[in-house]
Image (cartoon, grey):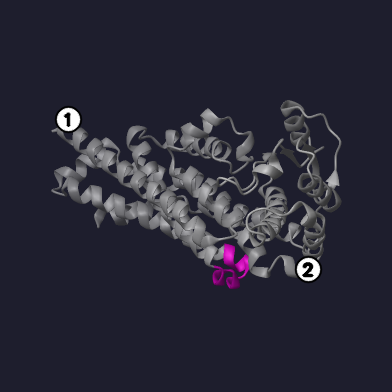
Amino acid sequence: MKVFNLFLKLLLDYRVSILSYVLIFVAIFALLTFGTTAESGEVSLYEPKIAVFNHDDSLLSRHLTDYLSKRNIYVDIEEDATAIEDAIFEDRLDYAIVIPKGFEDSFGKSGNYANLRTFANYDDGVNQVMDTQIEFYLSVWDSFRIAYGGTVPTAEAESTLAQVDEIMDREVEGSELVSENGNQAVIVANFFRLLNYILIALGFQTIGRGVAVIEQPNLKRRDLVSGYPERKRTWGLFTAVYIVMASLWVILALALFLIAGFSALRDQSVIWMIISSLTHVLALSAFIMLLIQIFSTQSSSTFLGTLVSLATAFGTGIFVPREIVWQPLQTVFSFMPTYWDVSNQFILEGTVSLSADLGEIWRNIGIMLLMGMLFFSLTLILRRVREKEAS
């Protein structure tokens, strides 16, 4: 417990820095949350700007085009991939759909449910709105198709589409479209994504600097000469690191639920967000510990805290949409646990069927755990090598 107690005493010297980081982060997040939360229970419905390119020109494809055009803002734009992507980036267009030739004839045949090409938005919320419209429409049509034995008779096509219209035109009150828990889930996911950034910066400022001090050659040599074994130093250090990082996470998580409301915990997706975020803290602690073993000075801790936190925030999609992050850069940052936790938060924020997404969520959690064990093992090996070199 000697190293453990010394580590905690060192953190008292950094209490002003820690408190400043925490208060600034919580204040900024509270302002962002309350600034974007509607005061009433009503939901303001956003009409996406869309373009539809219909190459099939069949009864179904024309009806689908009309359906989408009436429920959204139709934009006339050249059918060119580069032009469409530029328009989406410049916010002149939100979403584009290409209906290929043979769409109606191939629909539902040989496992081909819907052969559509889409140009998605950087905003997952807009994508969910459009995907839901398309999938709901096609699922209604597919129900009639199946009821007719696999193909809607030509004589019945127009009357069937009229029934599709009747079903699709049923309105739902805006206040019922998004529940309170649904809104809270978005708040929680945003918080945990931003929390990853602050924990990286805080981790290097706290445990990084603490480890750098304790690992100073003179201090380490004094402990060993006094009979305090290296094994105890190592485990005391690791224990302190994990407890401090977990404590910071708990404090910030409590601040989150004071802002968003503890009723958010009734949402199962929020529980999985918590599990994923806590797993990330464990893996991140091991990652920071490994880097500090390699760059073991207080100045390097400060430098790494700034560099790694900012680079990770941009490379994993915390500060910018992943769709505009260079793919090779995403591949590089996928070797950090933060990438996988951010992926989980995005999935859970917009999940429609949690049971369907749990496999991917579990996979990402498993990857973070494996990374944590790898970083932990590499740190132990590095310490052992250096111990042998020093003896």
Image mark for residue 315: none
Instruction: Decide whether residue 314 is among the magenta residues.
Output: no
Quadrant of the image containing the N terminus: bottom left
The answer to whether residue 25 is above or below residue 180 is: above
Horizontal relation, residue 48 to residue 232: left or right: right
Q: Nearer the viewer, residue 295 or 133?
A: 133
Question: Measured from the top left, where is residue 158 in percent x and y?
Answer: 82, 55
Circle nearer the N terminus (2, 1): 2
Q: Quarter of the image holding residue 176? A: bottom right
Q: Position of residue 250 (x, y in %)?
A: 47, 62
Circle on res. 172: 2
Q: Position of residue 25 (x, y in %)?
A: 60, 52
Image quadrant in which you'd find residue 267: bottom right
Residue depicted at x 78% and y 33%: 87
Residue marked by disc 1: 389
Q: Identify which amino acid the numbered label 2 is placed on.
A: Val
Q: Nearer the viewer, mark 2 or mark 1?
A: 2
Q: Report the span colored magenta.
A: 256-267
Q: Is residue 77 left or right of residue 288?
A: right
